[in-house]
Amino acid sequence: MPKFIKMKLFNSILLVALMFLGACNKTDNTLIIRDQQISNLVAKSESECNTIQPKFDVKTKTISYHQFGLSNNYLINTNNAFFQNTGSNTNEDVIARNSILSKINWNDLSNTQRNKIELVVESFARQQTGNLQHSQLIIAFVNDSAHTFIKKQNQRLDQNIISKIQYDQIMTDIEDTFLTILRSMYVEQKILISSSTNYRCLLTEIQNTLTEKQWEEFFSCVYNK
């Protein structure tokens, strides 16, 4: 084979290889960016969870935790107006309107996309059921423990086992003590970690369902909220 033909063939192969590598790099960069976008959205919801703090009612000596301390995005399901023609103002509708569901451009979706999103939201809600049940049990357990503890201290005071000064100090410390117990049990049961993991999976499925343009619009709406 003549030298110039070999050189021409080599240059062609090199060009194809460079184009292939360029395409791979572009794909890799896109995947990295899209994965980072999901991480940003997860971090945003985690930050929202951190702003919800359990509260201790001094009068009733009872702890309450709004939405179990979870972001609206961790509580969504398909029992709302986005998926059903309920026409009501249920708690599920309120949560949905303040969640990522309200940031999807539903009018721009195909029927296939709508059905897919409904399925992945249903799956997400099933995954979250365990976290919600554990949260409910933790709150009930901590409140029961607090009430039992208070009853015991009242008995100790009545029996002069402790003084009024000691009793008052114990009552003062109750709030911090049982709020700390609640938070530690949440960490132990990995409520927030598990919820974030489930949420990441949901976002990944939504990202794979939407077109690139639809996803970028969705991401922008959620992230800049």
Image (cartoon, grey):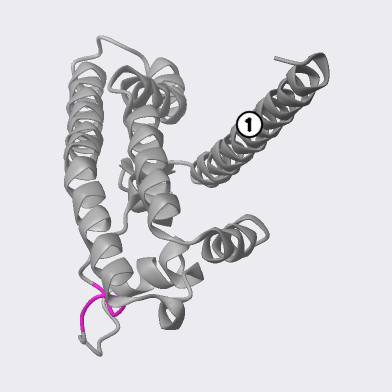
Q: Residue 44: within the magenta?
A: no
- Relative vertical location of residue 59 with respect to residue 107 in this rendering, above or below: above
Question: Residue, x 38% and y 57% (percent of image)?
Answer: 209
Residue 151 image offset from top left, x and y in percent: 19, 28
Question: Residue, x 51% and y 39% (percent of image)?
Answer: 46
Q: Is residue 11 visible?
A: yes
Q: Is residue 91 visible?
A: no
Which residues, given as a range, are shown in magenta? 80-84
Q: In front here: 208 or 189?
A: 208
Residue 179 sits in quarter: top left
The quarter of the rendered structure image containing the C terminus is bottom right
Question: Residue, x 41% and y 36% (percent of image)?
Answer: 196
Mark 1 lies on residue: 20
Residue 139 sits in quarter: top left
Amino acid carrying label 1: it is Phe
Q: Is residue 65 left or right of residue 165?
A: left
* Secondary structure category for the residue under label 1: helix
- Relative vertical location of residue 185 with respect to residue 84 in this rendering, above or below: above
Residue 188 image offset from top left, x and y in percent: 31, 17
